Image (spheres, rainbow, N blue to C red):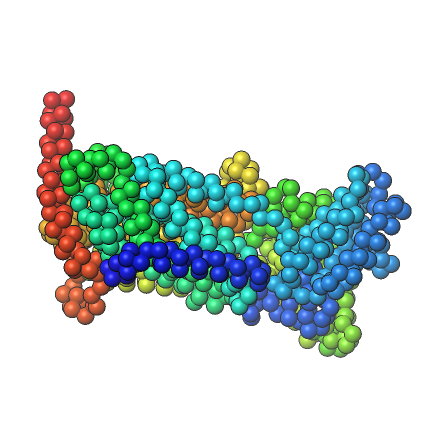
Amino acid sequence: MAALARWCVQRRLVTVLLWLLALVGIAAGAFVAGSAYSNDYKVPGTESGRATELLKEGFPSLGGDSDSVVWHTTSGTVRDSGVEQTMTRTLDRLEDLPGVASVTGPYDDEGGAGRISADGRTAYATVTFEHSGKDITSGEAEAVVKTAKAAETDGLAVELGGSAVELSESSGGHTAEIVGVAVAAVVLFLAFGSLAASLLPIATALVSVGTAYAGIVLLGHVMTVADFAPMLGLLIGLGVGIDYALFIVTRHRRGLKRGLSVTEAATNAVATTGRAVVFAGATVCIALLGMLILRLNFLNGVAVAASLTVVLTVAASVTLLPALLSLIGTRALSRRERRRLAEHGPEPEMPTGFAARWSAFVERHPKLLGAVAVVVMAVLALPTFSLHLGTSDQGNDPKTSTTRQAYDLIADGFGPGVNGPLTLVTEVDGAQDKLALDNLGSTLRTTEDVASVSPVTYNQGGDTAFLTVVPESSPQSKQTSDLVDRLREDVLPRAESGTSLDVHVGGVTAGYDDFASVIVEKLPLFVGVVIGLGCLLLLLAFRSIGIPLKAAAMNVAAVAGAFGVVVMIFQWGWGSDLLGLGSAGPIEPFLPVIMVSVLFGLSMDYQVFLVSRMYEEWLETGDNRRAVRVGLAETSRVINSAAVIMISVFLAFVLSGDRVIAMFGIALAAAVALDAFVLRTLLVPALMHLLGGANWWLPKWLDRILPRISIEPPECRAAHERLAAVTDAEVADVLAEEERQRDVRDTTG
């Protein structure tokens, strides 16, 4: 690491130029190639997946994505000649557009009446594309939207809904990113007192995240990447990138204050804290790539995209950042700090003030503070037990979007279930099967929570058939999920008895439910693998059994508390309208997997930075109480500053207008807040004080067989010890004096 840092410092202009060329080159490639995101929830082997395959094989023309065009009149009805002529021409134009296979409207002779509401004011048509959603270009979707919207008049509103239409929806700009970066810049300036030093973490994060964002766009052309993956990568990259740079800049500034040259300080910062950054980044990537064991295409793309972002932020932190630090020279210090350094020479930086007092307070009251932390985490985690996994629909989109307005028009005019009908598909063999299917329609119409059932439709060969069931409830409703279970477990098995029928339930809700079931089934294995690998890394780094076990427990607590907050806001609806997040609804089924990965990785960051300083002190003195006190006093300020930055960046993404991204932002912000302010600065040190020397216990036989890795190389640590020798002694004196004065004040009352 020292050699890499030295190379980047000595060739700083080359390093900066290489990063800028990478950013511009990859961004240009992404601009030329365009995006190719896909929210493909299909899971091979599930019942909904089999229904989709049968439908595609038996009815090739129905294999493409189906979207809706909805129109509503404020006066008269949709059957008025003017409205009918306008919309008929519009639907004909839509059918002639590239990528559109067919358009079925309310004015067709067969089945058209069912597409007009009872009051006659709302009607809809179905636009079927030639390809599935992941293969539809944004240009094809935008052409459909523009053509349909051209029919609008003062008395006629036209809206569109469906997954393809979402491709044309504006992201709402970059308000979230701008706000997050601005808040981070303010916090950094307050922490450093130097404008140049506060801008470097921002610049490093923006270059690395911008490169990663463009790389994710290109990645979508070679594998399935969800449309929220770039924003998720941006969210993680900004938070992690700024934090990593903050830790390195803090170490660099400490070196300057101790009299090191700019080159020596930058090199030493990367060789010491930079190694911790690489280690922390590796744990984040391991946690993210743990999603690959689920073998779900939808999550594979998210895992690779997020990991790519973390890798680039780490790379920029240990290459681009030292080059920039050497460019600004001593301006990494504030004017007051530079003036003091010139007048008084190098001075040790002692952890005085609140950080030292808090560390001593935790040392004196570990049982009480540990109990308070446990109660807080337990209360926040309680709502997690009522977690309901499901998929929000376009009824949760912003109220101004065409997809949300189309959803509301259909729900008001035809019932909420029309927004997410179920498709029952089966192979047919002979007259007996056809008779059973005809009887099935009658049975379904009398089934609880079923609003309507379409006639059975057979393909040309007569060997495949499907019928559409419209639930009484919305696609995201638990009532609809219960209906899917009822059909699969009770209604359909009875109807299939004595026949060769094997009816599969498909459709949006069924597909989401199957996706959630697969994730829940594999979640224990996934969590076990991620936690196990993380504990193994900590075991190798800190040569202790207790440290990894406490880290695992703390990470699980942070995840549980964060999910409790998510359930309260998004599922129970506490404050969701106030935050502009729409009505309450289920939690996305992929959220637990992604959040466990991200939160586990981020939690490991703070664990590494906190415990590595304690471990260093333990190796030097063998005194656990001193190691915990000094480690907490010296790292709590920078950890808290980093946490404030991360929380600000994550919460800013609530402004994105995207429910899924807002869910990620709030979950991550809650987890970081709990991790930094409750777990790492309260519960962890309290437990370490209570456990004493057992914190660092490792069986001798295990110590002999484990490979040795070090977050800081021996030569760098030795240099650091020489530089810090005076500091450590003075820190001890300061802490002892403060404690003595407190005892005197307590005694004199």
Pick out the residue farthest to the right.
81
Can residue 92 be seen? yes
| Residue drawn at x 78%, y 44% as measured from the top left | 152
The count of marks equals 0
Q: Position of residue 235 (x, y in %)?
A: 45, 50
Q: Quadrant of residue 20?
A: bottom left
Point out the image quarter for the C terminus. Answer: top left
Is residue 659 shown left or right of residue 431? left
Answer above or below: position of 298 versus 664: below
Closer to the camera, 118 or 655? 655
Answer above or below: position of 60 versus 576: below
| Residue drawn at x 48%, y 61% as measured from the top left | 25
Can residue 280 be seen? no
Q: Position of residue 666 (x, y in %)?
A: 45, 44
Q: Quadrant of residue 38?
A: bottom right
Is residue 724 shown left or right of residue 547? left
Q: Position of residue 744 (x, y in %)?
A: 10, 26
Closer to the camera, 628 or 417? 628
Q: Position of residue 281 (x, y in %)?
A: 34, 57
Closer to the camera, 642 or 256? 256
Point out the image quarter for the N terminus. Answer: bottom left
Pick out the residue farthest to the top.
749
| Residue drawn at x 70%, y 47% as measured from the top left | 406
| Residue drawn at x 32%, y 49% as measured from the top left | 327
Is residue 97 shown left or right of residue 17? right
